[in-house]
Image: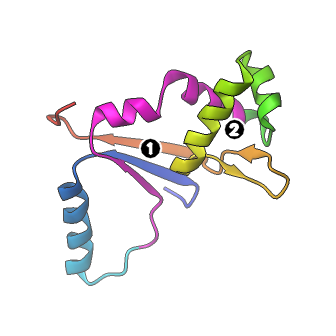
Amino acid sequence: MNDKTLLVYIGTAEDALQDFMEVWKSGKPASPVNRLSFESMAGFMRAFTPKRWELLDVLKRCGEQNINQLAQLLGRDYKNVHTDIQTLHELGLVQKDKNGLVFVPWDEIETHFKLGLAA
């Protein structure tokens, strides 16, 4: 794993706290980890819709784009792409450069799911 990898977890707040406590008790400084957590599979699925996964993939392959260019590449409505970009930006999955172009800063997105969590 490198600093261009985003770890996406689905687990409870208690799980996140337990992970933190394990690092704390070990006395070892943890290297920075790029992490995004969801409390439920339902929350994850609301954030990572198939259209948003497609958008991330196209944006990573094509490089920095404006929203109009992305909408054309995806064959989608500008407003819907804009809404998806806003959501992905709030989650830290895309970033904007100084010219307002959006890009995916990650080379990999790893997902970790715990079985037995309520939807």
Q: Which residue of the protein is positioned furthest toward the bottom in this rendering?
A: 27
**In the displayed structure image, the side of residue 90 where residue 115 appears, left or right:** left
Mark 1: secondary structure: strand
Any part of residue 56 in sight: no
Residue 48 falls inside the magenta stretch: yes
Tell me the residue that label 1 is attached to. Answer: 110
Label 1 or label 2, whichever comes before in sequence order = 2
Q: Position of residue 4 (x, y in %)?
A: 58, 55
Residue for point 70% across, 17% down: 76
First to last magenta residue range: 31-59
Residue 89 falls inside the magenta stretch: no
The quadrant of the image that shows the C terminus is top left
Instruction: Give the residue type at disc 1.
Output: Glu
Instruction: Give the residue type at disc 2.
Output: Lys
Residue nearer the viewer, 69 or 104: 69
Q: Position of residue 30 (x, y in %)?
A: 38, 74
Q: Position of residue 105 (x, y in %)?
A: 65, 51
**In the displayed structure image, the side of residue 79 where residue 51 appears, left or right:** left
Mark 2: secondary structure: helix
Residue for point 39% across, 29% down: 45
| Marking on residue 60 | 2
Q: Which residue of the protein is positioned furthest toward the right in this rendering?
A: 99
Disc 1 versus disc 2: distance between alpha carbons? 15 Å
Q: Position of residue 46 (x, y in %)?
A: 41, 31
Residue for point 74% across, 45% down: 102
